[in-house]
Image: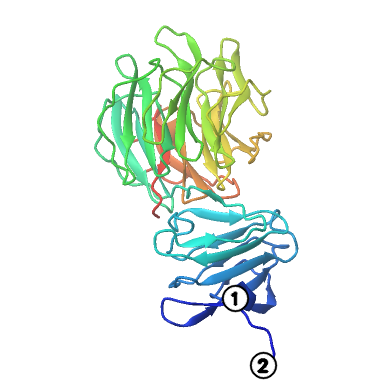
Amino acid sequence: MSGQITSNVFRASGVIAPTVAGLNWSSAVVTGSTATVEAQNGYWINTTSNACTITLPASPEIGDQIVLVDYARTWSTNNVIIDSNGNNFQGDPDTYTVDYSTAGQSLSIVYSDATKGWIPVSDDAVAFDHGSPPTQKAIFGFGYASSDVSITNLVNSSGVVASDTAGVGTAREALTAAGYGGDKALFGYGLASSTTAVTNLVSNQGVVSADTSGVGSARKYLAAAGYGGDKALFGFGILANETIMSVTNLVSNSGVVSADTTGVGTGRYGLAAASYGGDKALFGYGQNASGYVSMTNKVNSSGVVASDTSGVGSGRVNLTAAGYGTDKAIFGYGYTGSLTGITNLVNNSGNVAADVSGVGTARFHLAAAGYGADKAIFGFGKTSGNVSMTNLVNNSGVVASDVTGVGTARSYLAAAGYSLSA
C-alpha cells in the first residue's frame, strides 16, 4: 500500500469529514465583496480592492472546518468580515460584527455546537476582533413646544419619523440623550421648573420609562454620547445659578448613572457630543465665559475625558451631533451669531474637519442621532419658531435637504439611537 494517509473525523451525521490535512482548497482566488463558503474547504481571500464579507454555512455540523487565508496581505487595509449566517461565533450571536484585520493572517475555524458555534483554532495570528452591532433606529424626545413636553417620535431603520407618542416622565427642555447597552437609550438632565438630573431609560423597543431619580449635578444645555461599545456619559452644561460646568457622569451598560467625575477641559454649555471610532466619544463646540468656541475633548474607550483640543471650524452654540458610517461622527447646525446649517465631519480618529456648507434650513436647539446602522438624522429645532423638519445624513456624511416634519414642532429636545433590529 502506498500514498498519503490523512486524519479524518466522524461528523454528527456519520459522514467522514477531513481535518486540515485533508481540506479541499479552492483553485480560484476570491476577490469580490461577498463570498459564500462551504465546510471542509480552504479559500484564498484577496481584499486588495475591497473588503469581503464571508457567509458561513447555514446548517453546519460538529467538526465542520473552514480555512481562510490573506492571499495578498491586505486584510489590514480591507477587512474580512464574517457573517455566521444565523449561528453563533465564539459564543456571540450573529448580530455581532466579527472582522479580521491583520495583514498576512490565516483563519481556521471549526464548528463546535449551538452554544459556542464556530471557534477559531488556528495558531497563526488568530485575533478575535468583534464589536457590538450598530443601532438601527432612533428616538427624538422631550423639548419645548408651546410649553415643555415629554412626547417622543420614533425613527425607523429607513429614517422615517413616526407621529407623536404620548410622553412619559417629567416634561422638560435643554436635556440630552445617548445610547447604552448596545441597543437601548437614555434621556437625562435638563430644565423643567428648575434644572434636574432625572433620567428616563428607553428599551430596545423604543418604550420610555418613568423618571429615575437624578444622580450628579442638576444642569441644562449639556451633551451625551456612547463610549466603550455599550456605555455612555453625560458631560458639561450649566447649573441653575449659571455656573458653567465640565463635570461628567458615566453610565453603565445597565443604564445606571454614576456620581460626578471632576471635569477635564474648559467648562461650557450648548455643546454637542457623538461617538466615533467604534468605542470612543467626542464633546465639541459650545459656549464658555469668553463666547462661542469650537474646541473638542476626546473620550477614550474607558470613559476618560482628555484635555481641550484646539477647535476646527466655526465656533458655535446650541448645535447637535451624531455618529455615522459606523465609526465617524458629524457636528451640525447651531448659532454663530446667526443661525447656520454648516456641518463638520469627524473621522475615526476623532479629528474634526473644516466647515462644510450648510444644507437645509439653518436652525439651532435641534437634535440628532444615528439610525440604519451607518447613517444619521438631524431633526426639529428652532428658526424664528419651532420646526419639525428633518435632514438625513448618508453613510458618507452627506446631508440631504429638508424632509417635511412629522410630529409636534419643538426645540430644546434630544435624540439617541436604539435597537439592533431593523
Image point (47%, 37%), residue name: 368
Mark 2 packing: few (<14 Cα in 10 Å), some, or many (20+)? few
Residue that protrudes farthest toward the right in the picture: 72
Name the secondary structure under disc 2: loop
Left or right of 60 on screen, residue 21: right
Q: In this view of the protein, which residue sits in the foreground, 5 or 356?
A: 5
Vertical relation: 418 (above or below) 284: below
Residue 180 point in image, percent of width and height: 42, 37
Of mark 1 and mark 2, the one earlier in the sequence is: 2
Mark 2: amino acid? Met
Vertical relation: 381 (above or below) 240: below
Image point (59%, 45%), residue name: 397
Give the Cα distance between marks 1 and 2: 27 Å
Residue 217 point in image, percent of width and height: 40, 15
Residue that protrudes farthest toward the bottom in the picture: 1
Which mark's residue is nearer the viewer, 1 or 2? 2
- The answer to which quarter of the image holds residue 332 is top right
Mark number, residue 1: 2
Q: In this view of the protein, which residue sits in the foreground, 331 or 36?
A: 36
Vertical relation: 403 (above or below) 331: below
Image point (45%, 8%), residue name: 242
| Residue 16 seen in render | yes
- Residue ID for mark 1: 41
Mark 1: amino acid? Asn
Q: In this view of the protein, which residue sits in the foreground, 404 or 399?
A: 399
Name the secondary structure under disc 1: strand
Residue 218 point in image, percent of width and height: 38, 16
